Amino acid sequence: MAEVLKLAGGISVIPGNKWGKYPSANCIYLENLCLIDGGAESAWDLGPEIIINSHWHEDHISMNSVAKKIYAHRLDAGAIESYDEFERRYGLGKTVRLFLGLYPKLGFRRVDEFIEDGQILRVGDKEIEVIHTPGHSAGHCCFLIEGEIIFLGDIDLTSFGPWYGCLDCDVQDFIESIDRLLKIADDVKLAVPSHGLPVPKEDLERRLIEYKEKIFERERKIKEAIKSGIDPVGAGIIYRKFPEPVEIYKAFERVMVDQHLKRMSNS
């Protein structure tokens, strides 16, 4: 387990196992009051007053039951509050329960306050700007802390690239959200993704561009596969090899390919 990364002014990055390798996730702790996401195992005993959810996926809401208040975007609140809505958005039926056993503290509960784009949240003497960045989920948000540190959530800059395999994902929204982050990249000193190491200022713009390019690379390969009469799903375009359970990841890839087909038909 990586050590907590303490930044200036009572801000800490709490890394998940192997720097947030799924099913873990990194989170940020502020002023001994507020946790942004709850996927880091070492954060389980903190008992924060507030947890701000970047979005509704299990590795981000896994500690919601221990906080006094939950903040989240209105568009993701349904799946944070209700297992039925959580299951519906995954589109996997009851097999989604395979993921839930990984999270002993996971519970579905009411969102106490809705957050929205441009809102300034005040935690202690810190200011957190909400940046609505849909694509990975309808209500996915990033958080700019004190104008210098940005929590990217699942715009995670991994080599895998963007993930948009649930029913409320939108690949065009994802592109536009990355573009929005590119506009403020020069002003950010440190970017903290949910999965992977923090990214310093000097690398952020390049990493965002490379991350976005994965979408267009996939799209080119999907077009080539269709032209050759090959089903893009299972052709190694998104998942080089399906992890276990194969049928779940194949379903995710089908949704992602369908997202591309929709975007291509609208372009």
Image: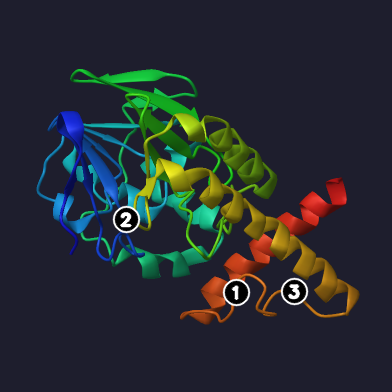
Left or right: 250 in relation to 2:
right
**Residue 116 visible at all:** yes
Q: Name the front one of labels 2 and 1.
A: 2
Residue 225 vertical position relative to residue 35 in the rendered view, above or below: below
Residue 18 figure quarter: bottom left
Q: Nearer the viewer, residue 111 or 140?
A: 140
Residue 149 in the image: state x and y as whole percent. 34, 34
Amino acid at dot 3: Pro
Identify residue for label 3: 232
Neighbour tally class for label 1: few under 14, some 14-19, many 20 plus, Cα within 10 Å: many
**Which residue was labeled with disc 1?**
250
Which numbered disc flags the more N-terminal residue, 3 or 1?
Answer: 3
In the drawing, what numbered circle is on residue 227?
Answer: none
Q: Secondary structure at mark 2?
A: loop
Rendered residue at 60%/49% (across/down): 209
Does the residue at mark 2 contact the one at mark 3 (Cβ under 8 Å)? no
Quickly name the residue at label 2: 25
